[in-house]
Amino acid sequence: MEIDTLICQIGDLEEAIRRHINTHRYQVDLLQDSSNWNQICSSLDVIGDTIYAIGSYEVSEFPKDSGLKYIYTYGLLQSLFLQQDALRHLSEAFDIQLSPSPILMEIRGIRNASIGHPTKQNQKGTRFHNYISRVSMSKHGFDLLRHSEHRSFDMINVDIQAMVGKQLAEVILGYTEIANRLAEADKMHKDRFKESRLRDVFPSAMGYFFEKIGQGIWAHSSGDREFGQANPRMLKETYENFQCAMEERNELGEYTKFDLDQYFHAIERVEGYLSGNSESMEEPDARIYWSYLRNEHEAFAKIAEEIDEQYQK
């Protein structure tokens, strides 16, 4: 498969993982462990950065200058090494065990022999001394000469293009495993609340609540005002249930929590006016709060419907 096709697949999988961790209901829990959160973010960034490096290597002309040939070769092999570590650390952060495949271990071994520990490499009880053949260096690879005390020179032809393709395919497998696990966790969370809609927290009598509150504010007798007093309490109870349901789903974001606090304040102000406990409140003030409560309710109902729609998918 072409390198650019593999890179596009990795980009799609990365986006799926980023969507998951940036979804409020999961981000709330992840942020409780700042070290683990930073490991996730760092790992995703490093994988993305190394993809950029590989992509640029793929489309760029290989330099003619000998020094730059080494820079390009060293950089490409180190990118593969960092990418492997980042994938392993990403899975670790999600408590997913990804065992390194023989393909990745072979690539890692070539990197170590070529640019990691070339001058004195101990491998399975044998010491190697390694050399990159300068005259063999090209965009497609190079010859690695190896010498040990037990035998003379060995020569390994390092096919960089093949290595890159194999590693990207392995990254896709690892990313797919992580993305699938996160998608399954998301499905389990949604299934838990699928039959309990947020919108149902608001009873059909909400309009009645607002109507009776308004009648209490416009009341011409103490009896009418007393009759209206019960409705702010019922409105407050309804919104307390709504807040609890949002918290249970981990859907109560910072902005929604601020808006709810404002809403509860408005309820308390209206309740104080109707009970006669708020000397600073006059009827025009109460009307303004009542209008705010009635209009803002539609915004909260819309939030509930949007979340319900996500959970029904």
Image (cartoon, grey):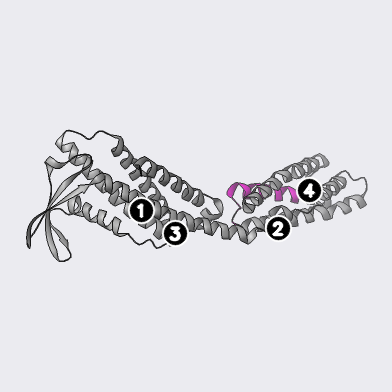
Q: In the image, which is nearer the foreground, mark 4 or mark 2?
A: 2
Residue 143 horizontal side relative to residue 285, left or right: left
Tag of residue 281: none
**Residue at mark 4:** 270
Q: Secondary structure at mark 4?
A: helix
Q: CA distance from mark 1 to mark 2?
A: 47 Å
User: Mark 4 or mark 3, which is nearer the start of the sequence?
Assistant: 3
Q: CA distance from mark 3 to mark 1?
A: 18 Å
The amino acid type of the residue labelled 1 equals Glu
Give the farthest residue toward the front.
1
Tag of residue 241: 2
Crowding around mark 3 (Cα neighbors within 10 Å: few <14, some 14 to 19, many 20+) is some
- Residue 250 is covered by the magenta coloring: yes
Q: CA distance from mark 1 to mark 4?
A: 62 Å
Q: In the image, which is nearer the foreground, mark 3 or mark 4?
A: 3
Crowding around mark 1 (Cα neighbors within 10 Å: few <14, some 14 to 19, many 20+) is some
* In front of the other: 280 or 217: 217
Crowding around mark 4 (Cα neighbors within 10 Å: few <14, some 14 to 19, many 20+) is many
Res. 31 in view: no
Q: In the image, which is nearer the foreground, mark 1 or mark 4?
A: 1
User: Mark 2 or mark 1, which is nearer the start of the sequence?
Assistant: 1
The amino acid type of the residue labelled 4 equals Val
**Residue at mark 3:** 94
Q: Mark 3 touching mark 1, by CB under 8 A?
A: no
The amino acid type of the residue labelled 2 equals Asn
